[in-house]
Image (cartoon, grey):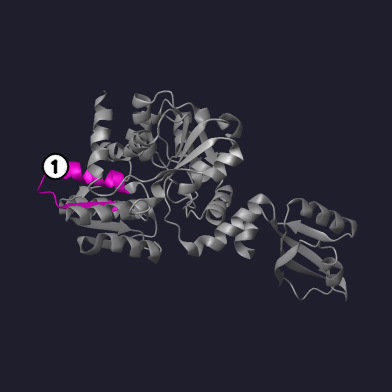
Amino acid sequence: MDDFADTALATTARMRGLFPATPLQRNDFLSARYDADIWLKREDLSPVRSYKIRGAFNAMRKVRAENPDQDLFVCASAGNHAQGVAFVCRHFDVKGVIFMPVTTPQQKIGKTRTFGGDNIEIRLVGDYFDDTLASAQAFCAEAGGHFLSPFDDEHVIEGQSSVAVEILADLDAPPDLVIMPVGGGGLSSGMTRYFRLMSPGTALVYVEPAGGASLTAALAAGEPVTLPKVDSFVDGAAVARIGQRTFSVLSGVPPEDVLTAPEDRICITILEMLNVEGIVLEPAGALSINVLDDLAERIRGRRVVCVTSGGNFDFERLPEVKERAQRFSGVKKYFILRLPQRPGALRDFLEMLGPDDDISRFEYLKKSARNFGSVLIGIETSSAANFTTLLAKLDAADFVYQDITSNQTLAEFLI
């Protein structure tokens, strides 16, 4: 057996002193939909509701084994990595200083503090993560601490490989295909190394958020590159630059096996898993399930494992998630409508609405015009096809309107 496989097995065994293996559950709902045998590796059910505890545990354990006097660990994170580090600091009874951006939601700060207790100190520094990271690294060097990288660290990669170890241990036969999310590459590179060694017949598919496709960019360039812009909605996987160590493992991945998931489409998966299955997933945790539609022909009749990497979802985001899901699926639209300033004009418009069309937003934008008034109107309906009927009626009646649903600039200011 390869040294990495031996290390992964030993690392996984040691984790049992910290937490039990996360469940690998067959999902009947998804299996029936795709005519496949679909299983979910529930990393959202770890003690910190993400897989990040694995890499943090292994890295801290190995550092302390090499240097027993090292009792200060530092990290920079606004989310799951911070919570994993905090939990493991308390487990090993060492001091942790966790740097988080000033803009970090109180919910995440509170959870990190709960996991770490008196063993951690949280420092809020910088409006942007780059500033937070620089401050954390400067403090770490000055204080003689050990900096815990969220993904680009060999010990972290070894720790994340334990997800693959548990998957193969729980099944009576290797899966045909495994779908995993990619951010900085810690989880995906660790799992890839183990599967290549222990189950080379298992196909691997990688999923990135469309607004943070750092692996896709690196494969195209042949080396890690920094994305000029990142959409932070999928905060658990939206990374501007994949790690150097992780890319050395993933550099041979065929580009066609790396899929991207639109942020708004991910919202549909979050809502569906919550409403149908009662499973709470954060955006990054929904990535692997979200691309099942794209793989429908490939997975029919096959055994598939989707890694649900995290469930740290702030329910204050639920209205935004619902809004984005409705817009993507075409059942909610926003218009600027020029409404004639005459008695009965509004009634004429309302009579064009179908029985399933509801007005969710109505606001006059300009009330001083003598002949026409501009109205911001939001409409929800049961089927995207209903808008075809409505717009045909508006055109026939010579109403002037503009669909601003996909206009990011106008939507930001008006919606």
- Tell me the kind of residue under disc 1: Ala
Residue 368 x, y percent position in the rendering: 77, 76
Up-down relation of residue 353 to residue 23 (above or below)? below
Residue 233 visible at all:
yes
Query: How many residues crowd mark 1 within 10 Å: few (<14), some (14–19), many (20+)?
Result: few
Classify the position of the C terminus by image quarter: bottom right
Indicate whether residue 123 is drawn in magenta: no
Question: Left or right: 332 with respect to 6?
Answer: right
Residue 185 x, y percent position in the rendering: 38, 38
Classify the position of the N terminus by image quarter: top left
Residue placed farthest to the front in the image? Answer: 172
Q: Tag 1, which secondary structure?
A: helix
Give me the residue at 13% from left, 42% from top: 65
Up-down relation of residue 329 to residue 10 (above or below)? below
The answer to which quarter of the image holds residue 127 is bottom left
Tally the numbered discs. Answer: 1
Up-down relation of residue 31 to residue 334 (above or below)? above
Give me the residue at 24% from left, 32% from top: 7
Question: Left or right: 258 with respect to 116?
Answer: right
Question: Left or right: 286 with respect to 79?
Answer: right
**Region in magenta:** 53-76
Q: Nearer the viewer, residue 137 or 216?
A: 216
Residue 17 x, y percent position in the rendering: 22, 47
Q: Nearer the viewer, residue 410 or 47?
A: 47
Residue 214 x, y percent position in the rendering: 45, 39
Task: Give the labeled residue for mark 1.
Answer: 65
Residue 230 visible at all:
no
Give me the residue at 44% from left, 33% from top: 218
